[in-house]
Structures are given as structure tokens and as C-alpha cells.
Amino acid sequence: MRADMSRVDDDGLAPPALLGEAIGGPGAHRPFLRAIFIAGTAFFTLSPLVSMLAHPPAPPATALLLVGWAIFGAVLAVLFRGSPFRRPGAGRWVAAAAVAMTVIAVVVAAVFGTTEGIALFFYSGIAFARLGRERVAVGGVMAVGLAAFLSGIAASDWAAGLTVGVTVVTISLTLFALSALGRSSRDLQEARIELAELAVADERARIARDLHDTLGHSLSVIALKSELAERLVADDPERARAEILDVQRVARESLAAVRETVSGYRRPTLSVELAGARAALAAAGIEGRVEPGPDDLPPDVDAVLGWAVREGVTNVLRHSDATTARIRVIADGDLRTVEVEDDGRGAPLQPDAPSTRGGGTGLAGLRERASRLGGFVEAGPLPGQGFRLRVTVSMEGTA
């Protein structure tokens, strides 16, 4: 697959593979975007520090301010360890560091009467804005803004304090909103990846289920007719030739069915499956009592009942050793039921065979199809001898 714009879906979003690379792959922290964040942060961190060192206040105030900048450096190390929009792993530590920087800024302004600590209010607001919990982040930002305003009052410059407080709150809440938006975007991308993976898994299950039901029946018929032709080739060559031609026909139809299944267009119909059941049972020497089905079924119901007939007849041919089989379509209010009964064995020769009798893939596929239409599947041996498969679906389930 080429790494170009052809890898973008029609809706303008990157396909799941690219989204996975963007979130968890090597490019998760895009170098260009990361460099912009680091450059901007370095400028707004070092510029006030250089200004303060050029005109340092009293030594105690300078020492406190240097401690404040050191704390902010440690906070930056934590924040830049991950994505600009990810929640920091050490949230409590970052919150404690933000409180410490706010206290230092207030002490420097109130006790020493210097404004060199204003930058620490912004650093504290930024640290709170990067916290994940909304209450803690917004509450911390508002507290820092209030502290900046009170520091201005303590320094007899309430207007400057108000300006700093409002600016701190505005910038910090803007950063908080951008971080929340970035997290939401990534969460949506991750959700899209998960949905895409579920869709792929569902499509694989559909193909496996349909191939099992399609090929299981067709291969059983091919094997049956081939054995019959082998027995007839010496005594009745014409009939053996007819059976071989029928094997070719079934093989071609199976190939077309496989193609339709893979492309998603395979929809068997009840009438076609009932006709095929009559022919298959007759070829196997089994007396087939096949009742006609209704013609006014919705497409989804018609398809599920068709699959039921196919699976039931396949199991009769492969496992039952029956002499008679009966197929009925029962209407009961809004319910439609296909019932396949035989007088053979009540269980397959091999209990682990993937059949309705063994509880394998066929039964699981029928249950999944029926459940989508508000229906259910019953399968089990009859009292004494024989086996019964009943698949019931609701006409209302197609709404």
C-alpha cells in the first residue's frame, strides 16, 4: 500500500491502519508539532527567567523564584514525556507543583513587593490546565487567577493584578479546552479503529458461516452423486453419465455461490432450497416429504429459512442413515418455522463433526441468523429414533 493520499477514505479520514500509526505507532508524537510546542514553551520559560536574572530582586526573592522555575522545569519534563494532548501520568504531582509555584509567586509579590514572579502564575495555570479532571483543572486555574489578583492588591496595584488574573485564567482555560479537544479527537479515532476491527471480524464470521453452509451442502451432494455414479457405471452407464453431469452442474453452482458469498450477495431462497432438498434426498435414496413453502416471505426471513433447509438436509445426507425425511414450513401468527425431521440416528458418527447434530459451525451460524430476526433454533434427537431441527424467526424482526 502506497503512503500517499490514496490511503485516505472517501469520507476524508485516514483508514484504520493509518489511524493506528498516528495514535500508537512511531509517529504518535509528530516531530514537527512537538518541536513547535517545545520551542514556544522554551521561549516563554527562558525569556522571563533571563529578565529576572538581569535585574534580580532581593536574594531571598531570587532564591524562591529560582526554586519556582526549577519546579516548572520538572513539570515540563513530565508533560513532554507524552503527547501534548495526553493526560500526564503523575497528575497529583503536577497539581502539587502548580500549588507550590502559586505560593512562591504570592510570597514574592506580597512579601518582597516584586513583580518578577508573575510568570509563575502563568506556569501554574498551564500545569492545572493539563490535568485530566475537569473540576480539578478548572478549579485550579480559577484559584491561580484569584491568587494573581490578590497579589496585585497586596502590592497596591489591583489593576495590574486584575489584568494578570484575567489573562492567566483566559490562557489556561484555552489550553485546557485545546487539550480536551485533542483528547476527544484521539478517543474518536481509537473508537473508529475499534469499530473497524469489529466490522472486519463480523465480515470474517459472515464469510466463514456462509461458506460452511454453502459448501457443506454442495460437497455433500457432489460426494453422494459421485458414489452413485461409481456404483452405476457398470450396470447403467447412461444414468451414471447423467449423475456425473449433475455433479458438474452442482460444482459450477457451488463456485458461483462461493463468489457470491465472498462478495456479500449470497441470499438463498426458501423455494429454491426446498426444490434442491427434494432432488438431493431422492438422489440419496431417502424418501423426501417436502411440503411447499409460502411465497410472500420478506427477503430476510426467506433467506434464513432457506439456510435452515440447506443445513438440515446437509445433516440428513451426511450423518443420519435415514430412510425418510420430512421438511415443513409452519406459520404461527408472526412466526415462521422450518422443521426438518428424519428417522435416522439421533447423533452423528463423529460427535465433533461440524454439523447441526454435533452443535458445530452450522448450528452456530443458524442461531446467529435467527437471532437477528428475533428467532431461535432447536435441535436434538427425537424420542426413540430420529433427529429434528427447528428454526423459527419472527416476521416483525425484519422491521
Image: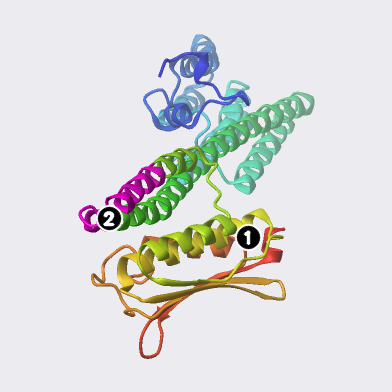
Return the x and y of residue 377 as percentages of the image width and height: 50, 71
Q: Is residue 287 visible?
A: yes
Q: Quadrant of the N terminus?
A: top left
Q: Earlier in the sequence, mark 2 or mark 1?
A: 2
Q: Where is residue 131, by image quadrant?
A: top right
Name the mark on residue 301: 1
- Magenta-drawn segment: 226-251
The amino acid marked with disc number 1 is Val
Q: Looking at the image, which residue is at 46% across and 26% down?
A: 18
Q: Which residue in the structure is indicated by mark 2?
A: 236
Q: Quadrant of residue 123?
A: top right
Foreground: 312 or 197?
Answer: 312
Mark 1 neighbour class, 10 Å CA radius: few under 14, some 14 to 19, many 20 or more: many
**Which residue is outermost to the right?**
159
Viewer-proximal residue among 289 and 137: 289
Q: Is residue 75 visible?
A: no
233 magenta-colored: yes
**SS class of the residue under badge 2?**
loop
Tell me which amino acid carries mark 2: Asp
Identify the element where label 1 is drawn. helix
Counting from the top left corner in percent of width and height, residue 52 is at: 53, 15
